Each structure stands twice: as structure tokens, then as C-alpha cells.
Image (cartoon, coloured by chain):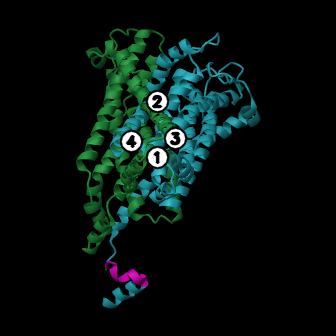
């Protein structure tokens, strides 16, 4: 018996003497169950890809891929359907751009204030307040954009170019406010990871608070800030309810933010809420547009994760 | 990461106060405050506006009556409120055990340099940022139509569970990581197995953090309308009575009333929004209460 144990201990290497003398099946089973739980997330990603890819391939066997990617007319539910996705992409990009013009500078400014200026106690009340902003349901934001923001825009915008009831500007502005907390909180994390010695060095050389913030902390946290910006853009592209409620459901190729336009997400939601028969071309358009949306956001998310890794490696 | 934040502001304020601030400094500071106030002011305006707009309909009818698309004056949101509660209960039931188990695996068992574990980790981070409507497409293809479950409580809760799973995992991992290594070492040194150590030492200490994270994750799920729309969840005038029952939820009801053109329905949408915000606020308060009450200093 002793001999057997010794053998096993020798086989197990240097830590062998710590090993228990009989195998513990319970421990192994627990580990297996936990691993299975962790795999659910991977299975979800695989399922998403499968769910999107198969109908998308079927879709492209009926509609040429070049017609889809470069066509400029999107009328999938008409008698004589056209499947050019360009109007949806343009709508998405215009609204995303408006949201970013709001969210990126304001988010970064908020982050600098929270990280470098705000006294600890103020920080502790301001941060949760911003987080509440991130937690407001997007359908409530959509309601706010449609019934509060749009009327204000109508009375504020000068000249004859009145905004339509559904317009990109009000959806984009409100979406921008919604994204501020995402940008601010990730940027602030990145700035918090900048070692204090860098700040102290700059102060010792006679810099003031503003110079330290803008010339030392922000550049040092740049990859994290970039990650925050990219994640913000990804959020804007994938946001659904605000645009569905406030930007309209008619595709429109224009750069005029006062007009209505349809985004990729809004199309998916409106087509999904109708009773489209399973297996029809209309049903498959949901997945084709969904694939495009998934590719956009997936690439942005991966880029963002990489950038966060980089600053973590440098400072932590 | 929390230690540097504690000292950051304090140390430097004494440095900057010497010799007064030049104009540009003051300007810069005010610009930053301006950036921050846009968010805060919008929040206040949004809340005030929604309450004022919904005020005339914040009455007993809202809770007692069923929704209607023809009679806004007496329509309520009862089926949507109960639907949301059912939905949240089952979403929590599916997602919290799975999320915590995944977090335990990643923190306590997984070798972070191993390829599979790295894939799982990146995958969870990425999944957390996938648009919610994509989860709706997943639910539509596989759960609602694929498995033929239809727009039921089961379909909705499974879809939302997958949606918030990454958030639960990330929050639970942070809670587990906050338990110091010395606790584990002590337990192992006394002869406990790894699972005994986790079950009797690590998890009890991490419970408050995990509870807070899970509640916050659920408060994300409760406001989601986009995935539910994809599942075909629509207008329902009865309360759910089981997993196989069709249902409606507050965000869906708010969406439907918002798209109605008559102002009475807009009023209803605002009133239902207030109900949703109150539930959200309650959840957040519980989370913050747990965090403050049970925070452990090691």
C-alpha cells in the first residue's frame, strides 16, 4: 500500500505529496459541471453564428450578394422586392455619427473630471448617477426622443427645413446621452490604471492639473480610452428601440439629420414584429441584415477588448 | 485598482491650491463640469418629464386594468406588469446559477494561459457587447420557432437569460476575485479540498458581491424590448399562468402605446414608463443596499 502511494506521488511530480490518497470523484464532477456552465457562453456565440449564417446563405442563393451590398433600394416587403442594404447602412452610420459627436467628447470630459478633478465624495455620488443613466430602458429613451426632443427640435431649428416627426437628429442626440456612461466609465477605468508616479513626476516638473490631465494621464490611458470609444460606437450601431421609435421605419439615403431614416436594427425589429412566415425571403432578410450588424459590432468589440488588454498589460 | 483611486484626487488637490488658478485652468475645469452635467441634467429632465406626462394616468386603473388599444381612458398595464415579474423570476432562475458556476470555474479552476479558457474569457467579454436584438434573432430562430415554443414566458426568459449571462459572469468573477488568496490558502492548509474551500470559504464571502452584480444584470434585462419584439411577444390581455403561457411585458407595452398616435396613449406610455422606472429603481436600491451593508474589508 505504501509503495503504491509512493509511486503515485512520484508520478504526480513535485506536488505529489500534497495529493490525496484516493481519487475524489466528487471534486472532478463539480469541476465538470462548472466547466459546462462556462461553456454555455461559447455555445451561445456558436448558436448565434449558426442562427445567422444558415438563413443568410440561403438568402444569398436567392438574392445576389452584390445586389445586397451595393443596391440602393430597400423594399423587401413590396410586390417587386429590392434588397439593396445601402439605405439601412447609411441610416445606421448617420445616427451613430450624431450619437458619437455627443457621447465621445462628453464621455471623455466626464471621465477626466471624475478621475482627475472630483473630490472622492463627489465622485461617489456622481458615478452611480451616471450609471442610472445607463440603466434607463431604451424604449423610455425612445419615448423621450419622440415626444420631448423632436418637438423641441421643431421649435429650435431655424428656416424652412423643419425636422420631420421621425428624424435622425433627435434619435441620435438621445442615443448619444445614453452612451455617455459607457464611454465615461471605461475611460475612467483606464485613467485610474495610470500609475500615480506619472502624475507626481509631472507635478514635480511644475505642470498644473490641466496639463497633467491632458498631456500625461490622457495619453497614458489612450488605448483604454480608444477601447471605450469603440465600445460606444458599437453600442450606437446595435441600439434598437430609440431608432425604431424616433427615427422612423422608412429607408432613406440622405445625410440630412432632420429627415427620417431607417437603421439596420430598426428594420430587423419591424420585420421581426410582423408575422413573417418562416422560410420566406422576407424572413431571411432579417438574418442577412442581422449578419451584417453582427459582423460590424463583432469586429468593433474584438478591437475594443484587445485595446483594454493592452493597457492592462502595461500598467497592472 | 481601488487603492490608487482613493489617493488620486486627495493628494493633488493640495498641490493645485497653491497660488490660485489661472483663467485657463478655471475654464478647463468648468468645461469638464459642463460635460458631466449634460448627462446628469438630461437624466433629471427625462425623469421629470416622464412623471409629469404620465401623472394623470398614475392611478389604480393602471395596475388593476388590462391593456387596451381602443379605450385609453381606463386602460391599464396589469398583464404587462405581471408578465414582467414572471419574466424576471425565470430569467434569474436560469441565469444566476449558470453565471455564478461559470465565474467559479474561470476564477478558481481555469488556467488562464490555457487556450480553451482564453477563448471562453474573450468570448464572454465579446458576448457582453453583442446588440440585444441579435439575441432576439437567436431566440427567434432557435427557441421560439426552432423548438416551437412560441412567444411564451419560457422563450422570453431563456432568451433574456442568455442576454444577461455575460454580465452576471463578469460581476461574479469580480466578487470572487475580491476574496483574498490567504483565505483559500488557510483552508487548503487545514486539509479542505478545493471544492470545500470554494463552497465554505470563498462563496460565502463573495455572496454580497454576486448578489449585487446579479441584480444589476437583471435590471438590464427588465428594460429590454428589442429581443422580446423579435420573439413575437405582443399584445396580451391576460396574466401569465405558467411557463407555456403567452405574455406581454412592460417595455413591449410602452413601445406599443408610444407608436399609437393618440395623445392619451402617449400618456399611458409615460405612466407605464414610470412603473418600469420604479421597479428598476427598487432593484438598484436593493443592490446598493446589499453592497453597502455587507461590504467586507479584509
Is residue B66 among the parts visible in the rendering? yes
Secondary structure mainly formed by the magenta segment: helix
Horizontal and vertical percent position of residue B284: 32, 37
For discs 4 and 3, the disc positioned in front in the rendered view = 3
Residue B127 vs A154, above or below: the answer is below
Dot 2: element: helix
Upstream in the sequence, badge 3 or badge 1?
3
Query: What residue do we see at 32% from left, 68% from top?
Result: B194
Horizontal and vertical percent position of residue B123: 52, 52
Q: Which residue is mark 1?
A: A188
Dot 4: element: helix
Which disc number belongs to residue A108? 3
Query: What residue do we see at 32% from left, 32% from top?
Result: B281
Q: Which shade is chain A?
A: cyan
Are the residues tagged 2 and 3 within 8 Å (C-beta)?
no
Which disc number belongs to residue B38? 2
Displayed quadrant of residue B62: top left
Residue at mark 4: chain: B
Q: CA distance from mark 4 to mark 2?
A: 25 Å
Q: CA distance from mark 3 to mark 1?
A: 8 Å
Which disc number belongs to residue B217? 4
Q: CA distance from mark 1 to mark 2?
A: 17 Å
Q: Which chain is green?
A: B
Horizontal and vertical percent position of residue A218: 54, 48
For discs 4 and 2, the disc positioned in front in the rendered view = 2
Dot 1: element: helix
Dot 3: element: helix
Amino acid at each position: 500500500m505504501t509503495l503504491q502511494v509512493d509511486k503515485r506521488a512520484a508520478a504526480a511530480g513535485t506536488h505529489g505529496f500534497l495529493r490525496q490518497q484516493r481519487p475524489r470523484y466528487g471534486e472532478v464532477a463539480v469541476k465538470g459541471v462548472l466547466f459546462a456552465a462556462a461553456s454555455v457562453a461559447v455555445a451561445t456565440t456558436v448558436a448565434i453564428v449558426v442562427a445567422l449564417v444558415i438563413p443568410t446563405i440561403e438568402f444569398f442563393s436567392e438574392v445576389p450578394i452584390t445586389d445586397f451590398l451595393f443596391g440602393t433600394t430597400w423594399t423587401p416587403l413590396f410586390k417587386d422586392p429590392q434588397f439593396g442594404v445601402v439605405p439601412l447602412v447609411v441610416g445606421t452610420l448617420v445616427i451613430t455619427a450624431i450619437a458619437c459627436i455627443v457621447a465621445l467628447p462628453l464621455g471623455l470630459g466626464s471621465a477626466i473630471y471624475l478621475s482627475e478633478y472630483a473630490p472622492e465624495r463627489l465622485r461617489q455620488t456622481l458615478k452611480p448617477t451616471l450609471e442610472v443613466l445607463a440603466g434607463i430602458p431604451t424604449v423610455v429613451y425612445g419615448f423621450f426622443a419622440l415626444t420631448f426632443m423632436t418637438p423641441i427640435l421643431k421649435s429650435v431649428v431655424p428656416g424652412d427645413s423643419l425636422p420631420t416627426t421621425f428624424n435622425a437628429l433627435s434619435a441620435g442626440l438621445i442615443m448619444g446621452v445614453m452612451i455617455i456612461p459607457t464611454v465615461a466609465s471605461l475611460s475612467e477605468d483606464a485613467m485610474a490604471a495610470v500609475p500615480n508616479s506619472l502624475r507626481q513626476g509631472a507635478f514635480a516638473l511644475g505642470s498644473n492639473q490641466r496639463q497633467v490631465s491632458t498631456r500625461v494621464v490622457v495619453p497614458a490611458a489612450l488605448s483604454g480610452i480608444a477601447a471605450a470609444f469603440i465600445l460606444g460606437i458599437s453600442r450606437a450601431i446595435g441600439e434598437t428601440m430609440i431608432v425604431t421609435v424616433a427615427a422612423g421605419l422608412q429607408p432613406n439615403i440622405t445625410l440630412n439629420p432632420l429627415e427620417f431614416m431607417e437603421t439596420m436594427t430598426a428594420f430587423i425589429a419591424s420585420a421581426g414584429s410582423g408575422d413573417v412566415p418562416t422560410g420566406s425571403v422576407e424572413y431571411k432578410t432579417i438574418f442577412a441584415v442581422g449578419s451584417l450588424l453582427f459582423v460590424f459590432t463583432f469586429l468593433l468589440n474584438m478591437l475594443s477588448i484587445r485595446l483594454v488588454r493592452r493597457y492592462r498589460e502595461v500598467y497592472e | 485598482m481601488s487603492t490608487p483611486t482613493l489617493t488620486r484626487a486627495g493628494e493633488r488637490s493640495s498641490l493645485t491650491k497653491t497660488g490660485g488658478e489661472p483663467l485657463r485652468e478655471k475654464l478647463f475645469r468648468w468645461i469638464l463640469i459642463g460635460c458631466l452635467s449634460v448627462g446628469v441634467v438630461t437624466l433629471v429632465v427625462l425623469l421629470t418629464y416622464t412623471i409629469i406626462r404620465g401623472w394623470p394616468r398614475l392611478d389604480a386603473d393602471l395596475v388593476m386594468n388590462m391593456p387596451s388599444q381602443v379605450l385609453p381612458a381606463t386602460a391599464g398595464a396589469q398583464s404587462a406588469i405581471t408578465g414582467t415579474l414572471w419574466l424576471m423570476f425565470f430569467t434569474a432562475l436560469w441565469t444566476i446559477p449558470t453565471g455564478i458556476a461559470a465565474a467559479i470555474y474561470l476564477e478558481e479552476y481555469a488556467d488562464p494561459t490555457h487556450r480553451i479558457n482564453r477563448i471562453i474569457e474573450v468570448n464572454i467579454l465579446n458576448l457582453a457587447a453583442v446588440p440585444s436584438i441579435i439575441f432576439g434573432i437567436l431566440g427567434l430562430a432557435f427557441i421560439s420557432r426552432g423548438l416551437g415554443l412560441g412567444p411564451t414566458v419560457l422563450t422570453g426568459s431563456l432568451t433574456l437569460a442568455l442576454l444577461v449571462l455575460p454580465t452576471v459572469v463578469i460581476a461574479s468573477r469580480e466578487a470572487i476575485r475580491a476574496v483574498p488568496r490567504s483565505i483559500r490558502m488557510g483552508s487548503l492548509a487545514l486539509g479542505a479540498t478545493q471544492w470545500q474551500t470554494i463552497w465554505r470559504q470563498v462563496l460565502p464571502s463573495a455572496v454580497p458581491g454576486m448578489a449585487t452584480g446579479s441584480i444589476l444584470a437583471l435590471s438590464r434585462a427588465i428594460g429590454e424590448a428589442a429581443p422580446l419584439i423579435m420573439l413575437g411577444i405582443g399584445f396580451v390581455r391576460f396574466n401569465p399562468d405558467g411557463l407555456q403561457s403567452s405574455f406581454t411585458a412592460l417595455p413591449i407595452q410602452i413601445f406599443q402605446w408610444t407608436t399609437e398616435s393618440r395623445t392619451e396613449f402617449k400618456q399611458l406610455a409615460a405612466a407605464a414608463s414610470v412603473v418600469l422606472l420604479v421597479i428598476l429603481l427598487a432593484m438598484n436600491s436593493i443592490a446598493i443596499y446589499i453592497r453597502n451593508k455587507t461590504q467586507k474589508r479584509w
